Image: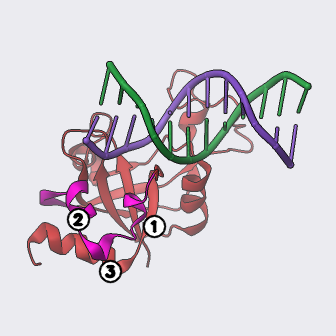
Chain colours: A red, B green, C purple
Amino acid sequence: MKYWLMKSEPSAFSIDDLIACENSTDHWDGIRNYQARNFMRDTMEIGDKVLFYHSNCDEVGVVGLAEVASEAYQDFTAFDESCKYYDPKSDPDKPRWVMVDIKFVEKFDRTVTLKEIKQIDELSNMKLVQRGMRLSIQPVEEFEYDFIINLAKGVL
DNA sequence: GCCAACGTTGGC
DNA sequence: GCCAACGTTGGC
């Protein structure tokens, strides 16, 4: 069992959008970064736990939980010329990009904000708060995952 | 909207 | 293989 943080811009795809999907599950398409792709392709497993993070918005932070619901498979949006994620260099016979399905688990009553996370010593090693870290899919430690849930629920 | 930091591309 | 130019990310 592994733990991840996955970023999404709520103006493009928010946690409420995920809830609204059939079975509260959707494919996580549009990843065009090799490191993030490799995590999905090589390391993620069905059932892995995900912190759902809203970036580039009014209230930046972790808004809820999800889980990995499929193995990695080819990201078909790379072959669609009309899609903004179109990548002419991705050959359908040898797809360059993959995605996984993500299933909604829980929406927090409140957002655990980036600002708040930055102020907590125990979370200072999270990739999220490292300078210049832009990866949209990041591994997190189990205790970090638990810590953020506890913050959201006011247990701490 | 700004801009720092980063990843990718492509000429050499 | 180097590195400048460019495009993107994402906090503020």
C2 horizontally vs A123: left or right: right
Which of these two is toward me, A132 or A48?
Answer: A132
* Quarter holding residue B4: top left
Per the rendering, the mark at residue A143 is: 3
Q: Residues within 10 Å of mark 1 (few under 14, many from 20)?
A: many
Q: Is label 1 in a helix, a strand or a loop?
A: strand
In the figure, A56 relative to A66: above or below?
above
Q: Could you tell me how far apart the alpha carbons at marks 2 and 3 are, in whole angstroms?
A: 16 Å
Amino acid type of the residue tagged 1 in the rendering: Pro
In the image, residue A37 sits, relative to residue B10, either above or below, namely: below
Residue at figure coordinates x 54%, y 59% from the top left:
A40
Residue at (74, 42) in percent of width and height: A93
Segment colored magenta: A107-131
The tag earlier along the polypeptide, 2 or 3, is: 2
Residue to which mark 1 is pinned: A139
Which kind of residue does numbered mark 2 sit on?
Gln
